[in-house]
Amino acid sequence: MEINTTEWFPLDRYAPARDGWYEVKLTSGETAFSRFVDGHWTEQPILVFTHWRGLSADPGISPDTEHMDAQAAAAQGVRAVWNAFFPGIEGTNPSEE
């Protein structure tokens, strides 16, 4: 299934209008997926990205949910690996040290 995405939007100038999954452009130039919920990106600061785009140019048509379930599992795996290599970073605030 081909996904009809929106254009890329700069992260520092625009935020999504609705909650959901978005494709993001990492600082390395690769792409990944992140979820936008209640005005916040769920995969930051783990994923450092500069742009985002919607997965469906038509908001009435949802993207392939099976594909997004796989991406969600991958994102959880990335977070688990990050936590394994950098224990204690999650939930800490450097200004409190």
Image: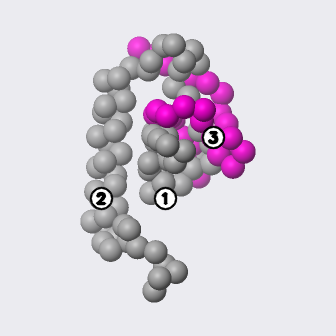
SS state under label 3: loop
Q: Quadrant of the N terminus?
A: top left
**Extent of the magenta region:** 1-28
Dominant SS of magenta comes to loop
Residue 82 part of the magenta-drawn span: no
Q: In the image, which is nearer the foreground, mark 1 or mark 3?
A: 3
Instruction: Report how far apart the C-alphas of labels 1 and 3 lie in the structure.
Output: 16 Å
Q: Which residue shows up at 47% across the image and 41% down it?
A: 37
Q: Is residue 32 visible?
A: no
- Amino acid beneath label 2: Val
- 9 shown above or below 59: below
The mark tally for this picture is 3
* Image disc number at residue 45: 1
Q: x, y (%) of residue 41?
A: 50, 47
SS state under label 1: loop
Q: Is residue 31 left or right of residue 67?
A: right
Instruction: Give yes or no for contact between labels 3 and 2 (Cβ–Cβ under 8 Å).
Output: no
Q: What colour scheme has been applied to the protein in the rendered image?
A: one colour
Q: Which mark is first along the chain, 3 or 1? A: 3
Q: Which residue shows up at 66% across the image and 27% down it?
A: 7
Instruction: Report how far apart the C-alphas of labels 2 and 1 lie in the structure.
Output: 14 Å
Instruction: Give yes or no for contact between labels 2 and 1 (Cβ–Cβ under 8 Å).
Output: no
Q: x, y (%) of residue 88?
A: 32, 74
User: Which residue is labeled 3 in the image?
Assistant: 15
Extreme residue in the right direction: 13
* Image disc number at residue 33: none
